Image (cartoon, rainbow, N blue to C red):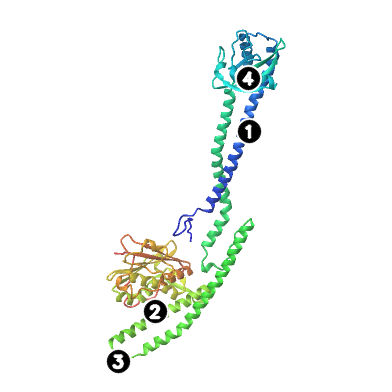
Amino acid sequence: MEDGKGVKQGGSPRISLRIRLTLWVVAIFTLIHWTTSGLLWLYQSNAIEQLADERLIEHADKLVRRVADMLPGVDRALLDEIAREQIQYIRFESFGIDVLRRDGTSATRDRQTLFDASEISAPEVLASGRPVFYRADASVLSHPGFAAQGKARVVAMSILGGDLEPYVLVVGTSDDFTRSQLALVGRIFIVSALLGPLVASVSGWFIAGIAVAPFERLGRMAAQMRPESLHETLDLPVYNKEIAELRDQLNDARQRLRGAFGMQERFLTNVSHELKTPIAVILAEAQTLNLEKLPKDAQDFVRSTREEMRHLGKLIESLLGLARLREGTAHARMSRVTLNDLAVDTVDGCLLMARQDGVKLVPELASDEAGLDAEIYGEPQLLRTMLENLVRNAIRFTPKGGRVTMRVTVEEGRGVLSVTDEGPGIPESEIGSLFERFKQGTNQRPAQAGRDAGHGLGLSIAQGIAELHGGRIRANNLEVGGCVFRVCLPLAGQPVAKKPVPKGVSVRYGHNMS
């Protein structure tokens, strides 16, 4: 079973559908984004390297005729001057030119090579007939007027000198600009790789929210399903086939539940009718007995039987009334009931139980203008059953010598009947399930735990009666001890004549709890 926060009761937490959809969107987008970005980075890096090589070959081709006319015996200073001229026209930080003979020695007059001849194979270049690329230390380009660091990009190609002998033209440039371009592409890739999942998370969250919104609305509607609302139909506008099918299935389930509850109510009505006759017979026979000829124990048994049969008869009548109200057939018995009169009648019906348990039962009636003649509209017997269940429950949990108070107030246009006891209170773990059927409290008085524990139906029936009258019952613990049950019911309107207070009931007007 799972609660509203997506936590499995009695198990580990579950991740909500919206979060799971968001994670899937982020995972898929991130995988695609990183894969395409990685391929793009490889392509862009290769393109930058290839462009640098092509530009280097382009400028080397421009130097072939110029250097060939100087051979053999070209000056080193002249080559450096030509290199300085190249820097003015291209984006190279440093530039160097060298010429090698067939055997790999320098073709300059001073016989000095700019690049390491051992790294450049002149016979290989001459034999291939095409440009050959090398990597060299860029520091060799650091001569007057130049400054280079890191690696140099070097290309060697064959040329024919003025003496018709083959030579190798070696052109090198620093690789700083190319490296900076590659670093820029790398930074862009890293930033994109970090921002992509973040953007995907935000987008995925909103997309998932749109996707699960119909499910959430259906869930809220399903959570509000009550036996009295089963005749209603889920009317949810949907724009896709899956949600429409789910809505239809929920409507079908609601119809099946309505039929099942109808069968239950009919069964309850039939059983109640069947029980009325034997209860009436037992009560009539108990009333005809001559108690004077019976032993005291038998007299007590007969009196107790009479009292319990009366309570059982009232319960059967309440169950029948509850069934009639659920079926919509008891509205003819609905009438206006004054809150103060209802409280007095309830206290009068519970006085005997309170005296037997040594509990003082005190009604505090409304005395202000708003509450003195305040009325509610309902079935009187059901309303009294509701309040008697609350009062008897309070008596059951109040220690001997304690007090149970019924207070009548009017708050924000609603009638409020509060039943306060001086018992041990309600354990926090039980408040949420207090009105469930067959739910029994654990903080009873030891003397009553076995004698009058009940069957866990009183509070459930009371809550059902309150809901049928458009109200609700709330339970809270008090800081000073004990707890209070508050019944909130809508007011009916114009007042009617008040009933006289039953004999033997001490009534106080006002809300002083002292």
Residue 30, picture quadrant = top right
User: In front: mark 1 or mark 2?
Assistant: 1
Label disc, if present, on residue 116 of the rendered structure: none
Label disc, if present, on residue 121 of the rendered structure: 4
How far across and down, in percent of the image, does residue 302 sit? 34, 85
Residue found 48% across the figure and 67% down from its top: 470
The reply to whether discs 4 and 3 touch (Cβ–Cβ < 8 Å) is no
- Neighbor class of circle 2 (other Cα within 10 Å; few <14, some 14-19, many 20+) is few
Residue assigned mark 1: 43
The kind of residue on which mark 2 rests is His
How far across and down, in percent of the image, does residue 127 sit? 69, 21
The reply to whether discs 1 and 4 touch (Cβ–Cβ < 8 Å) is no
Residue found 39% across the figure and 72% down from its top: 389
Q: Earlier in the sequence, mark 4 or mark 3?
A: 4
For residue 436, side relative to residue 245 (left or right): left
Marks 1/2: CA distance?
A: 90 Å
The reply to whether discs 2 and 3 touch (Cβ–Cβ < 8 Å) is no
For residue 393, side relative to residue 273 (left or right): left
Q: Nearer the viewer, residue 485 or 53?
A: 53
Q: Earlier in the sequence, mark 3 or mark 1?
A: 1
Residue 99, picture quadrant = top right
- Neighbor class of circle 1 (other Cα within 10 Å; few <14, some 14-19, many 20+) is few
Marks 1/4: CA distance?
A: 30 Å
Q: Earlier in the sequence, mark 1 or mark 2?
A: 1
For residue 452, side relative to residue 223 (left or right): left
The kind of residue on which mark 4 rests is Ser
